[in-house]
Image (tube, helix red, strand yellow):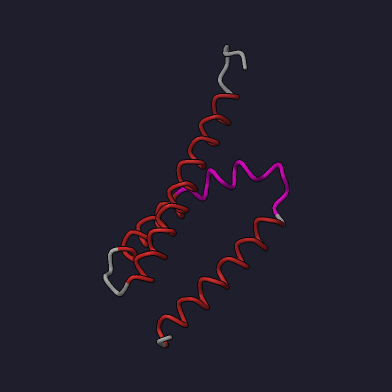
Amino acid sequence: MTGGLLVSLYIFILAVFTGFSLISRVPTLLHTPLMSGSNAISGITLVGAVISAGAGKGRLSAVLGLVAVILAAINVVGGYLVTDRMLNMFKKGKKR
């Protein structure tokens, strides 16, 4: 493994553990507003994943970039769907 790939893998693993640790400590009542507020960050992640997938640094980089694009897209779409559902709950005159 090259040094840059090893550092990238290390950062990825740290990001996974940090993200899981942070999300698991958020109270249930705050999950939807937190997801709503983090959609902009997910959009930035999606742009970074697209850049990583198309960087042309090798097959492994392209595959990891593709996985990152898929996961970030799922996160963005899911966040907007949950936010839309939450906002529909607060509309007046509409029955759930």
Q: Which residues are magenta?
A: 26-39
* Residue 85 x/y as whole percent: 55, 29
Q: Residue at x 40, y 83 (%)?
A: 4
Classify residue 77 as left or right of residue 61: right
Q: Residue at x 46, y 41 (%)?
A: 77
Q: Residue furthest bottom?
A: 3
In reply to whether residue 41 is colored magenta, the answer given is no
Q: Residue at x 49, y 48 (%)?
A: 75
Quadrant (top left/top right/bottom left/bottom right) for the C terminus: top right
Dominant secondary structure, magenta: helix
Classify residue 79 as left or right of residue 2: right
In reply to whether residue 28 is colored magenta, the answer given is yes
Q: Is residue 64 shown above or below 69?
A: below
Q: Is residue 54 shown above or below 1?
A: above
Classify residue 2 as left or right of residue 54: right
Q: Is residue 77 shown above or below 19?
A: above
Looking at this view, is 61 or 32 the one in front?
61
Residue 22's quadrant in the figure? Answer: bottom right
Q: Is residue 9 shown above or below 34?
A: below
